[in-house]
Amino acid sequence: MNSKLNIYVFFGLLLVLFSTCGSDDDAPAPALSSAKAITDFMVDGIAGTIDEGAKTISAEVPNGTDLTALSPTVVISAKASVSPASGASQDFSNPVTYTVTAEDGSTVGYTVTITMEPCASPDNIYAFTYDGKNYEVVREHRTWEEAAVCAAERGGYLAEINDEAENTAIFDEVLNNASIDLSMTIPLDGGGASYVWIGGNDFATEGTWVWDGNNDGTSAQFWEGDFDGTVVGGLYNNWGDEPDNFGGAPSPFDGQNALGLALTAWPFGIAGRWNDVNEANTIYYVIEYD
Ligand SMILES: [Ca+2]
Ligand SMILES: [Ca+2]
Ligand SMILES: [Ca+2]
């Protein structure tokens, strides 16, 4: 092929190119997409409920989840973008707005609210009032500390029994009205009896019994010592022949440091009396509210 022919071919190709471009200019420009929806929202494997009309998304995560660092997966319309990005860690202590930007630049905000499941299911709660105060019996298995944490989360504290009338009222409600299966709330070291947690413990110092039903470390001492011990501050107690810190050192068991209200008799006390039992037992509990 000579050089002259090469030039013809070159200009011929240019012509084809320009005519192609010309025909494109005649067609309408393709519209940029305005699609900007969140179509799927997953957090810790839980699907959020999307209300497309209200532009809200809600999800409930298990109790105990750290709401301050969650990284949801966000699926959006094709050609759109989202901020914060899918997979980015966010603090959901308060609702977070996810802004979706369509290809055409238009935007929409979704308000995402993530809440924790309550620590106690409403189905497992029996509520009653006594002397103008509200109480709840929770039929769920918890260690003493877990029970105290839940009591505090609900705005109360594990019951602090201040006199015989309150002890009788709580005992009667738990035993007769709270729909409790007594066989379901028996700690391993309570002499075979059934119990519910109330707000006393001797966690800090063996034998120093305090009321600390919200487990915040601020407490009033009501007893000092073992079953031969003494009342402190004139406060009420209703021990059986307890506390005995059964199983404490030097045995492998680590003693008894949490307060149970007995619902049935045991070798050292009748129903309605108190016993110290190991705090790791998981039994039902009673919350008191001011
Ligand atoms: Ca009380
Ligand atoms: Ca103890
Ligand atoms: Ca005991």
Image (cartoon, helix red, strand yellow):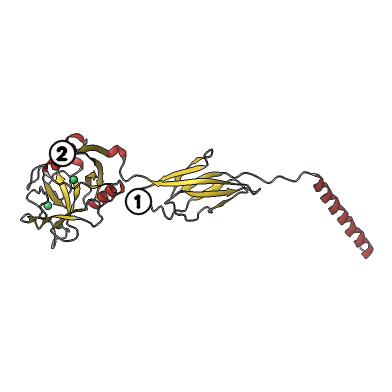
Residue drawn at x 14%, y 52% is 276
Between residue 237 and residue 25, name the one nearer to us. 237
Quarter of the C terminus within the rendering? top left
**Label 1: how many Cα within 10 Å (few below 14, some 14–19, many 20+):** few
**Mark sitting on residue 169:** 2
Between residue 252 and residue 287, name the one nearer to us. 287
Residue drawn at x 11%, y 43% is 164
The image quadrant of residue 165 is top left
- Secondary structure of residue under mark 1: loop
Q: Which residue extends farthest left? A: 228
Residue 50 x %, y %: 50, 41
**Label 2: how many Cα within 10 Å (few below 14, some 14–19, many 20+):** some
Picture quarter with ligand 2: bottom left
Residue drawn at x 54%, y 38% is 53
Q: Callout 2, which amino acid?
A: Ala
Residue 70 x %, y %: 44, 53
| Tags 2 and 1 touching, CB below 8 Å | no
Disc 1: residue Cβ within 8 A of ligand 2's nearest atom: no
Residue drawn at x 52%, y 42% is 55
Q: Callout 1, which amino acid?
A: Gly
Q: Which residue is mark 1?
A: 64
Q: Is residue 61 left or right of residue 29?
A: left
Say whether residue 256 is visible: no
Q: Earlier in the sequence, mark 2 or mark 1?
A: 1
**Real-space CA distance between mark 2 and mark 1, rounded to the nearest whole angstrom:** 32 Å
Residue 119 x %, y %: 32, 46
Residue 33 x %, y %: 66, 45
Say whether residue 5 is visible: yes
Q: Which is in the foreground here, disc 2 or disc 1?
A: 2
